[in-house]
Amino acid sequence: MNKVKAYFTRLPFSLKSAVIVTTVITVLVMLQSYIWVGKIKNKPDFWESDHAIFPIINHVIWLGFAPLIYSMIFNIRAKEIQATRPFNRIGFLIALSVIFTIAHEVVGVLIYNSYVALTHMNDGNFVFNINSGVFGLSKSFFEFWIIYFVLLSFHNQKNIQQIKVKNSLLEADILKAQMSALKNQLHPHFLFNSFNTISALMEENVELAQRMISKLGALLRKILKEADTQFITVKEEIDLAKLYLEVEQIRFDGRLITHFSVDPNAVKIQIPSLILQPAIENAIKHGFYKKTDKCNIYLSVREETDVLVLEVIDNGAGVKNEKDFSFGMGLKNIQERLKRCYGNQFTFYAKPMEEGGFMILIKIQKEALTNEHFSSAN
């Protein structure tokens, strides 16, 4: 039984589909023959005649031949023969059609004669005459070419599907490489800012600089741990943000105050790693812009009806004229990464608020959070 299943796996479609189609065609042919012979020609013994058994024998034989035909036409060696010259391909197919036509007729006669011998049925057609033999060969030759074009159609469809799968995998690899490149842009930018701060502190407060180095080390260890991971949970992203802000709080000596609001339902949702990093840097930049007092940064992650919302707000002076504001590298990085991850299933706002301060708002469609390319990007 396993060998039979293995034999039929050569087909570009399932054995179940092949059996169903063969059965339907057989029933239709038998019904047509019954109407013509049994009713119009008024043969009451139709179901005991060769007209009833022929379609079954005919289509069962072709079903048995189909995997062999497919493998002989589409195997590697056959493709090499057919690819050398167009004439070789036509000649190869014609030779194959003649071989299977004769084989079909021979096997059909053997099965039919065996059936007649077992059932003792004899309606005058037990021995094939020349005319019926010629008609049978012509009919089988025609049926071979029908089967060939059906197999060719499914073969091409199968190849198209395989190409689509390969292209999808290639696109996933390209996306991963692009995401890694964008993510890696953040690291030198972030490190430059951090070391610049430590350098300044070393001249003012060595103990504070040492504390900052310690916090920075903890942050870098966590970043390196997630180095090959394109997506992390909201909780992990918030933990990274907290570590970074602790480093910045040392830098600003207590003038930076942070506020976190994280929806418990959102903590396990995965988002691009370090996606909030440039937003937080931007908030610090604008928060202390033209200010000497304390700066408040509000970081919020929450679920709404059909979106995941990430929000970073500061209470700085903001920008008086929104036209004067332009995206820096960090904000462009956020937008580009979101676009590559979610296509058009996100919105990104970065603008000064009328009451002062600056807001960065990211909304990601929940539908996008379950896409295959998203879940397989890790």
Image (tube, rainbow, N blue to C red):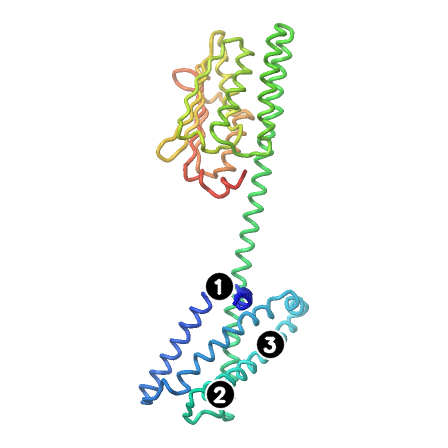
> Which structural element holds mark 3?
helix
The residue labelled by disc 1 is 14
First reached walking from the N terminus: tag 1 or tag 3 = 1
Residue at image point 49% right, 73% down: 63
The residue labelled by disc 3 is 96
**Residue type of the residue flagged with mark 3:** Leu
Residue at image point 40% right, 85% down: 51
Question: Which dot, 1 or 2, sits closer to the camera?
Answer: 2
**Residue type of the residue flagged with mark 2:** Asn
First reached walking from the N terminus: tag 1 or tag 2 = 1
Question: Which dot, 1 or 3, sits closer to the camera?
Answer: 1
User: Furthest residue to the right?
Assistant: 84
The residue labelled by disc 2 is 113
Pointer 1 and pointer 3: residues touching (CB < 8 Å)?
no
Q: Residues within 10 Å of mark 1 (few under 14, many from 20)?
A: few
Alpha carbons under labels 3 and 2: distance apart: 26 Å
- Rendered position, 14 above or below 64: above
Alpha carbons under labels 1 and 2: distance apart: 31 Å
Quarter placement of the C terminus: top right
**Residue type of the residue flagged with mark 1:** Ser
Residue 112 versus residue 182: which sits nearer the camera? 112
Give the image location of residue 258, x and y in percent.
46, 16
First reached walking from the N terminus: tag 3 or tag 2 = 3
Residue at image point 47% right, 27% down: 235
User: Furthest residue to the top?
Assistant: 204
Q: Residues within 10 Å of mark 3 (few under 14, many from 20)?
A: some
Residue at image point 46% right, 89% down: 117
> Which structural element holds mark 1?
loop
Give the image location of residue 211, x and y in percent.
59, 12
Alpha carbons under labels 1 and 3: distance apart: 24 Å
Residue 295 versus residue 261: which sits nearer the camera? 261
